[in-house]
Image (tube, grey):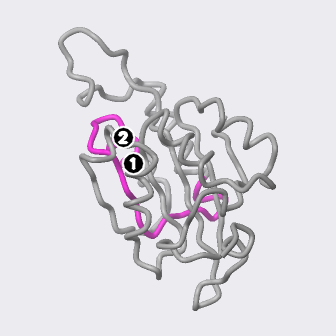
Amino acid sequence: MTAEERKGAQTPDGGTRRLVLLRHAKAEPGGGSVDDVLRPLALNGRRQAVRVGAALRETGLVPERVLCSSALRTRQTWELLAAHLGDVEPDVLVSDGLYAADVADVLDLLRTTDPRVRTLLVVGHEPTMAATASYLADPASDGGALAQVRVGVPTATYSVLESGASWDAWEPQAALLTYVGRPS
């Protein structure tokens, strides 16, 4: 099956899947005596996370499932944004593997997602979040969004990809990258 056929192929239930890849919000500087995995969000990062939650709610990107790195800054990002999603309780998996994950690791987790899930949020780190978006994005995607993920994204930035394929069938260049940005 070609990438074009995969992108257009509908799941058995005829739905579209949306993948939201979010780089954690701004963390306190590294170095010193604090282990990197234990770095908390900075005050500005806390504000960013709240704005991301509100933006996801306002744009209808409320996840049914969340994959979140176990690093403190990603967990704090998720917790703060979750409080602004409205009255929802997505299934959340906190994964040690996402802390040092590469694109293949993210795809492995993605492909195990329950097919009933329509919107999946991954809260992780750079360069993996942008690299995953770039890897999955069809070349016909929004040019500005493609350019951004190819060079990396700043903190609290999320990318949205859409495909008619079930999660276990997501392949390189087979999803439409529709948005990359962060709330102001």
Q: Where is residue 167 in the image (x, y as percent from the top left)?
A: 50, 72
Q: Which residue is drawn at 37% across and 29% down?
A: 41
Alpha carbons under labels 2 and 1: distance apart: 6 Å
Report if residue 63 lies within the magenta region: yes
Q: Which residue is drawn at 55% across and 67% down?
A: 170
User: Which residue type does callout 1 highlight?
Assistant: Trp
Q: In this view, does 64 lie above or below 153?
A: below
User: Residue 78: which numbered mark, if any?
Assistant: 1
Q: In this view, does 144 lie above or below 58?
A: above
Report if residue 76 lies within the magenta region: yes
Check disc 2 and report the residue beneath it: 74
Q: Position of residue 107 (x, y in %)?
A: 44, 57
Q: Is residue 100 above or below residue 162?
A: above
Q: Position of residue 51 (x, y in %)?
A: 56, 42
Q: In which quarter of the image is residue 102?
A: top left
Q: Which residue is drawn at 55% across and 55% down?
A: 20
Label 1 SS: helix
How many marks overall? 2
User: Which residue type does callout 2 highlight?
Assistant: Thr
Q: Quadrant of the C terminus?
A: top right
Q: Where is residue 37 in the image (x, y as percent from the top left)?
A: 25, 30
Q: Is residue 12 above or below residue 26?
A: below
Q: Is residue 125 left or right of residue 175?
A: left
User: Residue 7: which numbered mark, if any?
Assistant: none
**Residue that protrudes farthest toward the top in the picture:** 32
Mark 2 and mark 1 residues within 8 Å of each other at the beta carbon: yes
Looking at the image, which is closer to me, 69 or 134?
134
* Segment colored magenta: 56-79
